[in-house]
Amino acid sequence: MNVCFLGGYDPLYPRHEIIRKGLAATGVEVAECQVEPGFKFWLRYPLLMTRYFQARAAAAGTKSLLPNIFFVPEFCQKDVPLAKFLSLFSSRKIVFDPLASRFETKIMDWRRKPAGSLAAWWNFRIDSWAFKFSDLILADTMAHKDYYCQNYGVPREKVAVLPVGYDDSLFDPSAISGIDGERDRFVILFFGSFLPLHGADVVVRAAAIALKADRSLHFRFIGSGQTLPLIRNLAAELGLAELEFKGWAATKELVREIASADICLGIFGRTEKAGRVVPHKVFQAMGMRKPVITAQTPAVREFFLHRENIYLCSSPDPESLAGSILELRRDANLRENIAAKGQALVKAKFSIGAIGLSLKEMLEKTIP
């Protein structure tokens, strides 16, 4: 089997890296025809076409095989029509991994434009065309599959569920030495891109409640993004000068930050999208053998069990989150059991090898 990744995508984005490494680990031949995500389509299309046909010409004179599949990665809805056009010259199948719809993200989650606006209609149409032109669509959760099928009329047999998983070659506690938490503080770690679905404001309000009961707690925030200025202002309004805010961390540094934390936090957003996703950071923290607290949603319940391999709280409820943090603070055995079972689960089912094997089986069913 040969797969060609095609589009204006970030080759270092975790979803793409996990899929690319996973397929390669199963023996699938992988090629990349890629340009930077920021290029407009009128520039991106000619560049992608040129690079594809150059690669095709080079392969024709060697023993290299042309791809069986065009794989359009996350957030590349606008590149699916190009993949469809190129497939006319090769009869290749098209697999699209949206990760989220444009309408869902830009309109419903980020609320950049009203739902009834022209921009909302246009983003919905772009999603619809991408789904229509694809032979197989990947969804990261069953909740997202249901959303695509119900809102875009996609046949259920056309959508397969592939969790985002995590890169176990990077998020591996055995690769970290000399870190065993911070003895003088109990660290609660929130890391991410501060999107609305993350619900960082819920974490800040929960911190205000939890710190009244236990001053040994230390809340650390790593990352940046859309809601960070509002989150900093909220912390100041609540008099939480002790909250620690750090900027973006390189992967190696992030791994060390997770290793030094006692509890890691998932997402707590109020948006509908928050109920349909289980982000990379949940799998990453669990892979690092850390107990994870996140909101109880339909998506997270697809993969995990409360108090078994994860701790679930009500969302968006700061009091529920604060209570969850305080219980895990008091109960070291519960923390360790959740961390150990969580790590075992994600290593077995959501690692690079497991994701690659699952995807290969899906692709084999797509190729006639």
Image (cartoon, helix red, strand yellow):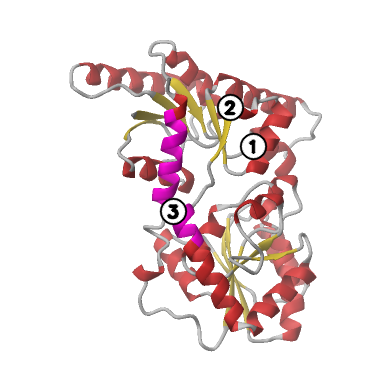
User: Mark 2 belongs to which amino acid?
Assistant: Lys
What secondary structure characterizes most of the magenta part? helix
Q: Is residue 217 left or right of residue 11?
A: right
Q: Is residue 359 magenta?
A: yes
- The relative height of residue 279 versus residue 287 in the rendered view (above or below) is above
User: Which residue sits furthest bottom?
Assistant: 184
Q: Is residue 286 left or right of residue 243?
A: left
Q: Which residue is mark 3?
A: 351
Q: Position of residue 265 (x, y in %)?
A: 62, 65
Magenta range? 345-364
Please give the name of the residue rendered at 74% of the width and 46% of the height, measured from the top-left corner.
272
**Mark number, residue 145:** 1
Q: Position of residue 172 (x, y in %)?
A: 40, 64
Neighbourhood count class around disc 1 (C-alpha, 10 Å): few under 14, some 14–19, many 20 upward:
many
* Quadrant of the image containing the N terminus: top left
**Mark number, residue 158:** 2
